[in-house]
Amino acid sequence: MGETYTLITGAASGFGRSIAQKLAPSRKLVLADINAEKLETVRKTCAAPERHLVWARDLSRLEGIDEELASFLAAKNIQIDHFVHSAGIFGIQFVRANEMAFVNRLFNINVFSAMQIIRPLAQKRVNQGALRSITFISAIGSRIGGKGYYVYSASKGAVNAMSLSLAVELAPGVRVNAVLPGTIETEMSRDYFADPDFVASIQAIHPLGLGRAEDVADAVEFLSSDRARWITGQELVVDGGRFASKTPSLKGIN
Ligand SMILES: NC(=O)c1ccc[n+]([C@@H]2O[C@H](COP(=O)([O-])OP(=O)(O)OC[C@H]3O[C@@H](n4cnc5c(N)ncnc54)[C@H](OP(=O)(O)O)[C@@H]3O)[C@@H](O)[C@H]2O)c1
């Protein structure tokens, strides 16, 4: 058995990078993303950069992800104890457009690549039973409807449902949870946040004001730590109160 690492997809940007920087002082990391150069840049910004590894892989191409990950772990003689799936893409698609190429690409990255990664991590011959937790970055878009969101929302709903069943299947050794962030400025949402009217509207619907990528990283750090040892199959909403504020006021005793 080699040393154990936390694997983070989407680590070159946004939430994934923030999660990497949060975990770097206390863990060894495998930083995964599509762009090797960006991964190297992030690795260098992490505490103790020499301890961390990078795995560059296009997760929209599903074939071979499982074998390539298994080979990577074997070549480095390491195992993965925590897996965080933050890689993802977003896009507005209206139902009448029906572009299946977009649907397939989005589902491959947001959902199916995680399945391909989890399979070898759950196999004793590959990962030596080292896996302890899986944390998916979902979205409150899985709970709140929006025009043009149906593909993205469906992918995040799939992530939530996958998380629930995996929590049952992989217990007691592995805990599985999902974090559901509200709208936060990252590279993914940067163009929207460039518009002051958009920022004002986001501020208005989040009772706690604007969120930060670190808010998501804090939730991931907790869920993937032993302090969450009795928490599995849960969806943790990190949205500055946006979802709560949509709940009708309670009348009487509920
Ligand atoms: N930001 C928000 O408001 C928000 C809210 C709720 C949920 N989320 C979710 O949070 C997760 C992280 O989002 P983020 O805001 O941190 O976005 P981000 O900054 O764009 O980070 C996503 C990362 O995934 C990578 N990626 C994209 N396609 C890939 C592929 N084919 N193979 C491997 N990696 C790929 C991106 O690489 P490139 O940039 O090089 O393409 C990027 O580094 C996503 O699942 C997103 O749906 C975001």
Image (spheres, helix red, strand yellow):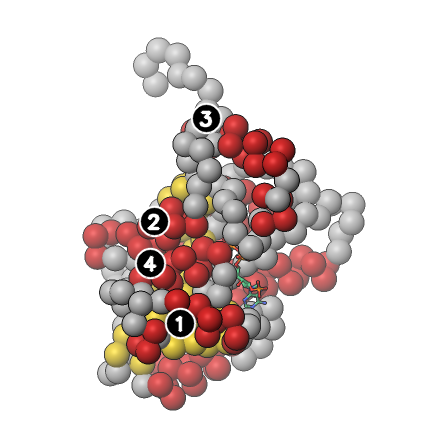
Q: Nearer the viewer, residue 19 or 94?
A: 19
Residue 99 vertical placement versus 146 (above, below): below
Mark 3 highlights which residue?
245
Amino acid type, callout 4: Lys
Residue at point 56%, 63% (across, down): 109
Contact between labelled residues 2 and 1, with CB atoms less than 8 Å apart: no
Q: Secondary structure at mark 3?
A: helix
How far apart are the two marked residues, 2 and 4, measured between alpha carbons?
11 Å
User: Residue 205: image x %, image y %?
Assistant: 51, 29
Mark 2 highlights which residue?
219
Q: Earlier in the sequence, mark 2 or mark 4?
A: 4
> In which quadrant of the rendered view does residue 54 lie?
bottom left
Residue 131 vertical placement versus 125 (above, below): above
Report the quarter where the C terminus lies. Answer: top left
Q: Tell me the mark number nearer the camera, choosing from 3 and 1.
A: 1
Q: Tell me the mark number nearer the camera, choosing from 4 and 1.
A: 1
Amino acid type, callout 1: Lys
Disc 3: CA contacts within 10 A as few (<14), some (14-19) or many (>=20): few
